Image: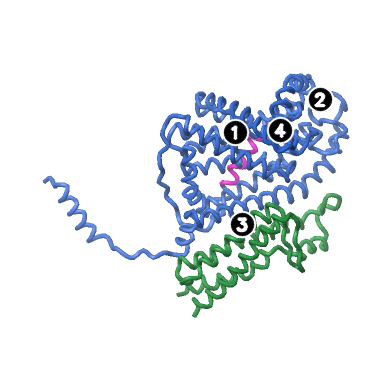
Chain colours: A blue, B green
Amino acid sequence: MTLTADERWNLIEKISNKVVTFGKFKHTLKDALGELTVKPLTGIPIAITVLYGFWSVFSSFAGTLCTDGFFVKLFDGHFLPWVQSVFPGVGGWFYYIFVGDPAADNCFEAFGVLTSGLFVAMGVVLPAIFIFYLMMALLEDVGYMPRLAVLVDTIFHRIGLHGYAIVPSILALGCNVPAVTATRILETKKQRFIMMTLLAIFIPCGAQLGIMQEVIPESIGIVLLYLIFGYFIFGFILNKLVPGKSPEILIDVPPYQKPMWNNIARKLRMRLGGFLKTAVPFVLLGCVIVNILYLAGTIDWLAKTLTPLLTGWFGVPGETVGPLIAAFLRKDLAVAQLSAIEMSKYQMITSVVLVSIYFPCIATFVMLLKEGWKNLIGSFAVLVTVIFLYGGSINLIWSLLGVQ
Amino acid sequence: MNDRIGRIYFGVLGIVTLIFGITDLIVTMGGNDFSWGILEISSDMFRGGWGGIIVISAGFFYLSSLKNFLEIHQLSRALMASILIWILAGTDIFVRITESIPGGEEGPWFNSLEGFLSTYAPPYPPVIFLLPFSLVILFFVGKRKKA
């Protein structure tokens, strides 16, 4: 027996009338709160508050309590003098690589593998990454992240992405490596390319944020503002230039719920484990390579060669070349190295922005390569353009404002 | 009855919250910290500027919840206003906790009991004064749940 379309619909209606009970949907307080967080007029102030809470807890836990409260004292007051006194061969190249400057009285300036390397990795970056991922997991578990995705959907469409781009963007604030993987939730090649390029260039990782909080606490807001502007300006340009589609999304928004601590602990363990395995070796390796380059005279030679470009176009000292090389291995290490160079506040801001938008760290580079060499070449071309245009424009702004 | 009490209470709280938020912004724009008795308003961009915008938002949330106060959507606005204040006050308290534990640059590893307690002494930012008053929303939420 064959049924026509109308007969089929009639049959469906009859069956559903018998088996489905229709009731009146009653809003709960959770539903009403959920609605407030996705409507722009109420959702934006809430998002601003969540970000405030996130940043305040991040800086006071990682900066005030862990790093300044205990780790600086531990490393500068006890560990550094001990290593300097027991490590053999003061003045030798082996000593220089592992302990660094024998006259240094703090771990930021020593720049050895066992001094600056361990201090940056364990004393500064680890607490920052820990608290970042803890709060991130909390927001995910409570159910705020999908609502944030809905809220920012319209803004992200302007740069060829959609609301879910907020997930890799925020993940990148922890570490760019999982963020590159998270770009797979975007549907088209165009979206993935734009997202990967933007996060590799404009989003500083948690490690870098931790170091920035330590080295330039009073200027961190300006640096972040530059990066946010750059993110949207170049996102807008890329959306116009890159061919391809930017489709709409349908998001299933779960109700707000109490966080499950087992879930949070598991996520935290997994992400911290990933950080310790991928980032810490690169920090230590970074110290070794940069120290070898210093000993071989390569950095001095590069600094002399590139000084006209660095001072003329970007307005930063020639010595910045060392941190720029270190930035290829770890950007947090590079910012730490910048703190030891004598320069004005404005030069420091420009240098930190340059280190941020400069080539992605090697771990991110490998992840980008995994996603396809064409993407990598494209991102690299955008990156070179961004460094020269955006980096140079910052110097231009300082010149126009009459500050240097 | 509850509706009327709620409207009056959160109306007053909304206005006070709004005034505190505006004062936060004015002090930030002025560039000097403001102190009056046990009240202190910071002029830094993060706490005064960004925080001020949040306090103003909370004030508007309270005021927009007044009409038909016990209706679920309106009540949720007042609850959200309180949540904004809890986040702000919570982070202020957290900052004090993180400052109170270590012993300082030249001191011992941990703070002395005296030093620890003195961190929690006044002056306080406005949002700390708003905190106990914002908790009243829990009474109305509880009442609604029971009903």
Along the viewing direction, whichever of A43 and A53 lies nearer the viewer = A43
Residue A402, quarter of picture:
top right
The vertical placement of B137 against A142, above or below, is below
Amino acid type at circle 2 is Phe
Counting residues from the start of the chain, the first of labels 4 and 2 encountered is 2
Disc number for residue B88 = none
Asked if residue A2 lies in the magenta stretch, the reply is no
- Numbered badge on residue A334: 4
Foreground label between 2 and 3: 3
Please give the name of the residue rendered at 59% of the width and 27% of the height, measured from the top-left corner: A385
Label 1: chain? A
Q: CA distance from mark 2 to mark 1?
A: 35 Å
The image shows residue B5 at horizontal and vertical percentages of 53, 77
Counting residues from the start of the chain, the first of labels 2 and 1 encountered is 2
Circle 3 residue: B53
* Magenta span of residues: A267-284
Please state if B68 lies on the left or on the right of A294 as rendered: left
Which residue matches tag 1? A201
> Between A175 and A316, which is closer to the camera in this rendering?
A316
Q: CA distance from mark 4 to mark 3?
A: 34 Å
- For disc 1, the neighbor class at 10 Å (few under 14, some 14 to 19, many from 20) is many
**Which-is-in-front pick, marks 3 and 1?**
3
Q: Chain of mark 2?
A: A
The local secondary structure at tag 3 comes to helix
Classify 10 Å Cα crowding around label 3: few (below 14), some (14-19), many (20 and above).
many
Q: Magenta-highlighted stretch: main secondary structure?
A: helix
Q: Which residue is mark 2?
A: A94
